[in-house]
Each structure stands twice: as structure tokens, then as C-alpha cells.
Amino acid sequence: MVDGSTKVIAEGVDDEPTEANRRLFDGRTYFLVAAFSAIYAFFHLAALNGLSIYEWTGIRIPFLPSFPMETWNFRIVHIAGALILGFTLYSARSFSGDGEKQPLSKVLDIIVYLALLPALYAMWTAGKIANMIGNGVQWNGISPEFVNLEVYHFGTPLLLATAIGIVVGWLRKRERGQVAIADILLSLCGVAVAVYLITIFGTLMRNSTGTPFAPIGMSLAAVAGVALIMELTRRVAGLALIVIAGVFLVYVFTGEMLPGFLNAPDIAWTRFFSQVYTDAGILGPTTAVSSTYIILFIIFAAFLQASKVGDYFVNFAFAAAGRARGGPAKVAIFASGLMGMINGTSAGNVVATGSLTIPLMKKVGYHRKTAGAVEAAASTGGQIMPPIMGAGAFIMAEITGIPYTDIAIAAIIPAILYFVSIYFMVDFEAAKLGMRGMREDELPKFRDMIKQVFLFIPIIILIAALFMGYSVIRAGALATASAAVVSWLTPYRMGLRSIIKAFEMAGIMSVQIIAVCACAGIIVGVISLTGVGARFSSVLLGLAEASQLLALFFAMCIAILLGMGMPTTAAYAVAASVVAPGLVQLGIPQLTAHFFVFYFAVVSAITPPVALASYAAAGISGANPMETSVASFKIGISAFIVPFMFFYNGAILMDGTWPEIIRAGVTAIFGVFLLSSGVQGWFVGSRVAWFMRLGLILAALCMIAGGLISDLVGIGAAIVLFFVQRTFKPAADAQITVSGSD
């Protein structure tokens, strides 16, 4: 609520928003979809924790897979399940045009029903191949008999059905409460791809990927699989990632014609596609993380939602910070950091918490674009907040081999710098505008919130388990179980029905991130197979000969460009493949290089001109999206400077002695204070002139640089500026504030 006469009590802030193309079911259809979603999520929890059906029931069922499954098979099933669930839940287009007439609807229906036949035939052929191999047939990629079976009886029907399903799914009229036949067709194609690949990868032919001896069916299945993944990604994440993936795919077959470092060897389509659906591409690091850590923490987040912990986080933030000047903005920083850390998506977190905080910020005096910008910047910061850091920390651990706990520890000071900077920015903005905090009677009682502080126990258990040496998977499972136990101390007790509901929500919530990670795997596969990443590294090395700072700036621009319009996990995965290896070759430590790339992949969500988090916030605040993205860029300005601190001062990432780390942290915090003062034009309780602002920014950069001499210069400059402001009180120039005027 935002009415000043009543208390602000957060309710439903962590409920999942309904997308414009999301189907809403009821009755038997809802039950079937919910059951599949819950089973899909529980399957991962069981597989990751090494459970088996026998351990649960005492009954051995021969045709069910034992857990833990073979790695590639597990990832193939992981993607196939997401395709089925995704095509069931998400229509090819939004439902805004439900009333439009379609004169060709009957023709399209006939086409798609006929296309079910080749899809089923491809599935039957995949099963036949599995049966033949199971009976001892030695499969190979060159025998005419096998080639004929794979091309004409499996691949061609599969590709035909896939193409028809995608095209008709787009053209055919949509009904929100029903699954389209075209999407059932695409689900069948996804199953056919999975059955064939699991069968072939279970033979010696697994070692032939990327060679002339790979079965042609492997390439055909991969073509269909890539098309299905890209279509689902388009439905759940928009066109940005699809366009980038499409450019990379075109590059595979045109790279030989390009000049300079973009020149790539000629790669046959069969060679490329026989390898892209392996751990060199789609089944590689991105899917490895989405099928383990990410889905596990999505289940954890779903349990927190079911027990209403998200509501508590926001109410706690209001009780703690709501009375400060510009209170709702400071609440947004606290609440969005907590929520964004768990849900792993900047734009999604904006929608969740921003629906409450943005109207309240406008109510106390913030311009609507500033209200949206604060929420966007705070929600984006959740991706760098340890210990969970959205999903980025897990992908970084998978790619680099650095222990997850080391990554979480290294992220502490940078996260503090980011949120402290945003706090200063909104506080100075509130001071300039003379804002008040919220009244006592408008807020939840802090003493009531303290009585429920036990709701933080699942987070505490997660952190404690990680630092006690438990694996990330086991720690996540313990935290998930504790969320259910803790709920028994609240009105929202989780019984069997609530637990099943939580698994259902987890399955639905996982679809977007799984599709995005699989699609990012396509790009990673292109980079790996064409060698463009290595050639990009040579370009960075060439720039570094002139200036390392120039090379870092170039790497920053590439990381931001790759991340524009993409979810954080995909943005980092792609940038880590293209940019990070070059930084490592410059002599930058691996952890520093990957954190540098990760930060800029994250802040691409608030970087104009394509800023997903800012656009989502603008949709709630009613402000111009571009103005909101520019304002969020200003508010999160420190995030564009902090990564350069990693390069100049490793103590920021906890690499050094404790005195070095403490000095680096304290001076950097003072530096971002000066930076915020300079950007906002507010210092020692009053507005400042333009030359004072410039001096504050220069002093901040000296403090941020991290050296002892530069720190002393920065402190000296700050002292001089303090006395100039207090003694001479130079007149402040007319300035355009971040907020503007409504």
C-alpha cells in the first residue's frame, strides 16, 4: 500500500509476475502441468543429492535411471525437460491479439496435425536406434545403412517437424488456457533429440564428435536442438540473445571470408553441429551450472517464496530504513540487494520489489525516473551480493576452477562499495530535495520484525554450511530443508501441499534461466570451435603494449556490449569466453580477470542504450525508459570504477594481508563517498560549485586507485575542499539533478 493513512506492509513481493505470453491453466490441464513442473524440479534435487528410487521406496525399477546420472545424459534430460515445460507454458507470441481473425487457421491446423507424424516417426526411429545398439549393433558414422536410417528416417522428419512447429506456433491464433498443438509438436521434437543423443553418446561414437566419423544423425539432431533452444529463448528472454547467437552462428560459416583477427577457418556444418551439442558448447559450463547450482538455488528461492520470507525481507528493510530521509529509496537498496542475491535476475527483481518501493519513492518526493533508477541500480547490485550472487558465482567457479567460497569472500568488499555508493547517491539526492522519511505509523514495527529474525536462518545455514566445507549442492539442500522447517514458526506453515507447490514454482522459474544458459552455450561453442577468443586475446595483448589501461577499457566496452539486453548469467558466460582469457594473458590474475568481466556483464543491465533492469523499472514508474537508464547509470557509477580497482589493488578482492585489506576497504569507501558527492553536487551539508564537484571526483579517483601515495593525495585534496567549502562557501552553480523535476 502507498496510502499515507495506512501502514506499508509488503505482501507478495516475491510472487512471480505473469508474462504477456505466459499461459494460465485451470482444471485438469493445470494439474498435469503443475505435476510435470514439480517432478522436473524434484528430479534435479534427487539427482544432485545422489538419491535413488530404491533408497526412497525400497523397490528397484529397472527402466528408471539411477542417481547420480551420467553427466552428459543428465544435462540432456535437463534441457529436454525445460523445452517441454517451456513450450507448454510460453506461447510464441503474446496474447494481446487474441481477438484477431485468422482465415488460414484451418489450413494451419491441418499442417501442424500432419507434422505430428514425422515428429512421432523421428521419435520411433530414435528408439529403434537405441534398441539396435542395446542389442549389440556396433554403430558407426559412415556405413550407408546407418547413414540412410539417420538421414531419411530420423533427421529429415525431425527437422521438418521442428520447422513447421516454430512457424505455425508463430502464425496460429493463441488461447491462453490451452496448449497449442504446435507447441506439443515442438516438445515431441525435443524428446526425439534427447533420446537420440543419449543413445549415441552412450557408445564409442561419443569420441567422434567434431570429426568426419561422427554420425550424421548427431549433426541433424543438434540442428533441431539448436533451433528449439533458440525458439524457447526468444519466448522467455526476448530477441537480444537470439540476435547475438545468430550473429555467432553466421560467423561460423562466413568467418573464412572476414579479414584480420576475425578470419576463421572453414568449418563444415556437419563438423560444427556434431560438436556444438557436447560439453564444448551447449552441454558445457553454462548448462553444467544451470543443471546443478542454479536450479538448486531456484528451488531454494521457491521454498523461501512459499514460506513468505521475501515479504519479511522487504518489511524488515522498511522497519530498519524507512524513517531515514528518502526512506523508500534506502529500503529499495536493502530489500533489492537481498532479493536480487537469491532470484538471480535484475529485471525480475525490479518487478518484484519495485512494484512496492517505486510508488513509495515517488510519494516522498523522488522524480519518477529517479525512483525507477534507484530500484534498477539496487536490483542489479543483488547479482554481486555474496554469498549467492544470483548465479554468477557458480558459473565463475565452474569456468575458472576457483573454489566457490573463495569467490564469495572476494566479492565482499566490491559489494559493500557498490551498495554504499548507491546509499550515498540517494541520501545526497534526498538532502538536496529536502525530503523526509516515512512516519512511524506508516511502517512495520521494528520490534515485531526483530521477533521474526529467525526467518534469516536459511540464509545463515547456507553460509555456515559453505564455510564448514560442505559442497554447494549439499549446502543448498540443507538451506532448502531449513526454509521448510522455519516456516513452521510462521502463519505460512509448509505442509506437503506447500512443498509440492514450491517444487512446481521452482520448475516454472527455472525455464528462463535454463533456456538462456543453453543458448549462451551455443555462443560459447562457436567461440571455442572457431578460435575467435584466442584471436581476441591477441588484440588485447597488442593494445596492452601501448597501454594496459587502454586494453582494460576496451575489454570493459566489449563486456558491456555483449551483455546489453542479456540476462546476467548469459552475459557473463559469453564475456568470460571472449574477454577473460585475453586479460589473463596480460598477466592479470584469473580471479581478478573474471571479476572484472563479471562486473561489467552485470552492470550492462543499467547501461544505456539497452538496459533491461532500467526499462523494467521505467514500466512501473511511468518514466521515459532512456531517461531512467541514464539516471540508473549515474546512480550506479561506482560499479564502472570498482573493477579497475581490482587491477590496481588486489586487496579489494581480499588478496593481501589484513592491514592491506582493511586499508584498501576503508580508503575505497571514502573514495566512493567523494565520488557520490561530486556526481550529486552535495558536500558537507550544502550544494557545491562546479569546480568543487570536479575536485571531489578527482580526489575520489585518487582514493580509489589504491596506492599509499594516491590515498594521501586524495585525503589531502578532500581536506582542502572541506575547508574551501566551509570557509568561502562558493556559490553553487545551476545544475541539473539526477532527479530533475516532475
Image (cartoon, helix red, strand yellow):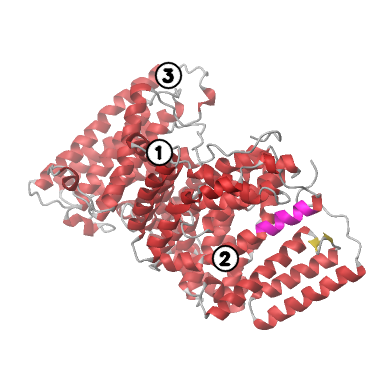
Residue type at tag 3: Ser
Query: How would you rate the neighbour count of disc 1 (Cα within 10 Å): few for under 14, some for 14-19, many for 20 or more?
Result: some
Q: Residue placed farthest to the left in the image?
A: 135
Quarter of the rendering containing residue 286: bottom left
Residue type at tag 2: Pro
Which comes sooner in the sequence, label 1 or label 2? 2
* Residues at circles 1 and 2 in contact by the CB criterion of under 8 Å: no
* Residues at circles 2 and 3 in contact by the CB criterion of under 8 Å: no
Q: What residue does disc 3 label?
A: 105
Q: Is residue 202 above or below residue 617?
A: below
**Image quadrant for the C terminus?**
top right
Which residue is located at x 68 percent, y 37 percent? Answer: 622
Magenta stretch contains residue 630: no
Instruction: In this rendered view, identify the residue nearer to me: 428 or 543.
Output: 428
Quarter of the rendering containing residue 366: top right
Query: How would you rate the neighbour count of disc 3 (Cα within 10 Å): few for under 14, some for 14-19, many for 20 or more?
Result: some
Q: What residue does disc 2 label?
A: 414
Q: CA distance from mark 2 to mark 3?
A: 55 Å
Instruction: In this rendered view, identify the residue nearer to me: 530 or 242.
Output: 242
Residue 221: percent from left, percent from top: 29, 44
Residue 688 visible from this viewpoint: yes
Which residue is located at x 37 percent, y 28 percent? Answer: 182
Q: Which mark is residue 493?
A: 1
Which residue is located at x 29 percent, y 58 percent? Answer: 210
